[in-house]
Image: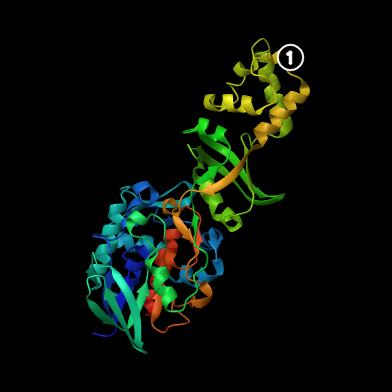
């Protein structure tokens, strides 16, 4: 056979890279330190696997948070349609859900992983499970030596590093790839959690644990500068906030980590201040003889009412017909701008993806080959690229994996 290729990491990037190289007649060995392939992929999309996104390539690129331009070549070389078509060949039918998210019809991530495993086998890839790589060494212009933790040594002509990031470490993403890359002289940009829940300083947040709010607007500020805004669903937790719009926000505010970040929630984004005040006036007329604490049930979820009362300037036992115009206006401002202070992110192990990684300046975007070491390639989350939720991060894995497998 021709060239001998080592692929390190049996996630989506590694599997596509290995199968692509194998389809070209190369002798490919895929090393995975877990006892099964696709362990992190198994838990994506809450176990349903959000395979990719059905948007146009430009839309996909728009949802990339870091180093968008680096991915043009990859996204056009292996598209969202290509992964859907590939899975279809192995019997995995797909469906499109809200936000153009693509899932398997079966709602089982295991079906996607099994299809990719069959793709590997069909293309002659040798799969080595429970094999942890200790070190990779370049011997000469055409040879690498890989040392395994069981003291075994193997030799290859090319190496593809597809080890993932540092998130969900129980799935094996422990940052090995960064160590290998660094040993070869690559720069690793700051590793930060992305797509991760946020810890909030204010204690009142704990009282709202478990409350999900739909159709709210969230904004984040450093000083007077707005650094993020989105509309959608938010969840209060015992430590702060989570939910889709918070996860997206985390990918943008991590650039300002260490600064004082304020987060604002507009609880009624479909109403202007004037219309919200008219709405409150109607409720106040209806409940004019009740105390303030009993007048908000038509306006807010029950769990939120005691917190809003506490944060407002209105005494809870004040009768509604005694509330002043100024107090009412203050209440409007509170509902349109429920402000909290960002304290920290949850641990990186809870992040969906890692922000940062092997510098894109040191990788050829059209081949995924290192510009520093000939014959060394990178694919997937180990590279300094990541996206918002919605299937985009998995598409990064397939597309970069395909280019690495094609060019190795």
Q: Nearer the viewer, residue 148 or 20?
A: 148
Where residue 407 sits, quadrant-wise, is: bottom left
Task: Confirm whether residue 322 shows in the render.
Answer: yes
Left or right of 398, for residue 387: right
Quarter in which the N terminus is drawn: bottom left
Per the image, the residue denoted by label 1 is 322
Q: Is residue 287 above or below residue 45?
A: above
Quarter in which the C terminus is drawn: bottom left
Left or right of 19, for residue 335: right
Q: Report crowding for label 1: few under 14, some 14 to 19, many 20 or more residues within 10 A (C-alpha).
A: few
Q: Nearer the viewer, residue 234 or 366?
A: 234
Question: Residue lying furthest top in this view?
Answer: 289
Task: Confirm whether residue 41 shows in the render.
Answer: no
Q: Position of residue 161 (x, y in %)?
A: 37, 72
Colour scheme of the picture: rainbow
Where residue 306 sits, quadrant-wise, is: top right
Q: Position of residue 325 (x, y in %)?
A: 77, 22
């Amino acid at each position: 056979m021709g060239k001998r290729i080592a692929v390190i990491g049996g996630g989506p990037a590694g599997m596509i890279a290995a199968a692509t190289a194998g389809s070209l007649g190369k002798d490919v060995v895929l090393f995975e330190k877990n006892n099964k392939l696709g362990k992190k992929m198994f838990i994506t999309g809450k176990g349903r696997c959000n395979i990719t996104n059905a948007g146009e390539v430009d839309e996909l690129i728009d949802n990339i948070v870091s180093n968008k331009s680096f991915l043009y070549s990859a996204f056009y070389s292996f598209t969202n349609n290509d992964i859907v078509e590939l899975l279809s060949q192995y019997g995995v039918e797909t469906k499109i859900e809200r936000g153009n998210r693509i899932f398997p019809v079966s709602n089982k991530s295991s079906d996607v992983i099994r299809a990719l495993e069959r793709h590997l086998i069909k293309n002659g890839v040798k799969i080595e499970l429970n094999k942890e790589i200790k070190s990779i060494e370049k011997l000469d212009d055409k040879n690498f030596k890989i040392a395994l933790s069981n003291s075994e040594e193997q030799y290859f002509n090319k190496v593809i590093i597809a080890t993932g990031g540092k998130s969900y470490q129980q799935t094996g993403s422990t940052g090995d790839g960064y160590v290998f890359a660094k040993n070869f002289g690559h720069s690793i940009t700051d590793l930060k959690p992305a797509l991760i829940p946020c810890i909030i300083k204010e204690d009142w947040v704990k009282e709202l644990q478990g409350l999900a709010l739909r159709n709210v607007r969230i904004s984040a500020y450093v000083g007077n500068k707005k650094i993020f805004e989105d509309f959608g669903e938010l969840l209060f937790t015992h430590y702060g906030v989570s939910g889709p719009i918070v996860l997206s926000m985390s990918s943008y505010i991590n650039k300002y980590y260490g600064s004082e970040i304020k987060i604002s929630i507009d609880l009624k984004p479909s109403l202007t201040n004037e219309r919200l005040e008219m709405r409150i006036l109607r409720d106040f007329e209806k409940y004019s003889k009740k105390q303030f604490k009993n007048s908000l049930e038509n306006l807010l979820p029950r769990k939120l009412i005691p917190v809003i009362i506490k944060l407002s300037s209105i005494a809870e036992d004040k009768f509604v017909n005694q509330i002043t115009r100024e107090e009412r206006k203050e209440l409007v401002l509170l509902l349109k701008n429920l402000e909290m202070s960002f304290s920290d992110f949850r641990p990186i192990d809870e992040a969906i993806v890692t922000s940062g990684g092997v510098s894109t300046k040191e990788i050829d975007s059209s081949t995924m080959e290192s510009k520093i070491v000939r014959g060394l390639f990178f694919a997937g989350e180990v590279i300094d690229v990541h996206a918002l939720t919605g299937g985009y991060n998995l598409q990064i894995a397939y597309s970069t994996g395909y280019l690495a497998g094609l060019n190795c």
